[in-house]
Image (cartoon, grey):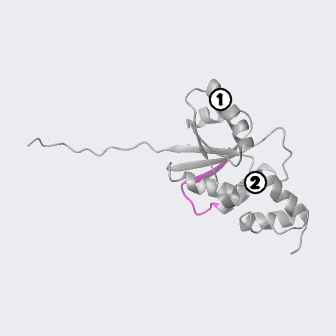
Amino acid sequence: MVQQEYRYIRRKERLAVYPGSFDPVTNGHVDIIERSLKFIDRLIISVTHHPVKKPLFSFRERMEMLQGVFQKRREITVDYFDGLLVDYLEKKGIYLVIRGLRAVSDFDYEFQMVLTNRKLLPQIETIFLTPREEYLYLSSSLVKEIARLNGPVEKFVPEIVVKKLKEKFSLTH
């Protein structure tokens, strides 16, 4: 009988970045974040500046909302960047990206981004996750429109976001 020597093998921590504007974070985002942790050890949620979008909330406000939602989760960090995702990933030394897909239109845009980013930084890998069915239609833009029209947003966003939307639009429900 051959005796095997067992050594403690330290597994490299699996890190990923989930970039997005999160203006504001929705329950669909939360679902993607929670489900991504089945595949990775730690996640950096990175708030980005999207040059085409005019955000309702500042970087700081978006980061504070995300930090509030995930304050008890040690495996989640909230960060931000302004510029190219590939530059941010290289700076962090992380080459795995999490992205959410809701519809075919999302896929077209995301597919272009993946191919472009891979051309700029070949070691990038992307995992696409779809949210649960109840969030497939949900977007930050839709939530902002509902809030702007004094509609109930409680079913669509975490409580901290409900409060921030009401403050932003000076709503009283």
Q: Give the residue at x 72% y 36%.
A: 108
Query: In the orientation shown, which residue stands out farthest toward the bottom?
Result: 173
Residue 1 on image: x %, y %: 8, 43
Inspect the magenta stretch and tell me whether residue 78 lies in it: yes
* Picture quadrant where residue 127 is located: top right
Q: In this view, does 44 lie to the left or right of 167?
A: left
Q: Is any atom of residue 170 visible in this view?
A: yes
Residue 109 on image: x %, y %: 73, 37
Q: Give the residue at x 50% y 49%.
A: 39
Q: Give the range drawn in magenta.
A: 70-79
Mark found first going from the N terminus, 1 or 2 = 2
Q: Is residue 50 left or right of residue 130?
A: right
**Mark 1 to mark 2 CA distance (whole Å):** 28 Å
At mark 1, the secondary structure is helix
Q: Are marks 1 and 2 in contact (CB under 8 Å)?
A: no
> Which residue lies under the disc numbered 2?
62
In depth, the one of 33 and 58 nearer the eye is 33
Nearer to us of marks 1 and 2 is 1
In depth, the one of 73 and 135 nearer the eye is 135
Q: In this view, does 160 lie to the left or right of 86?
A: right
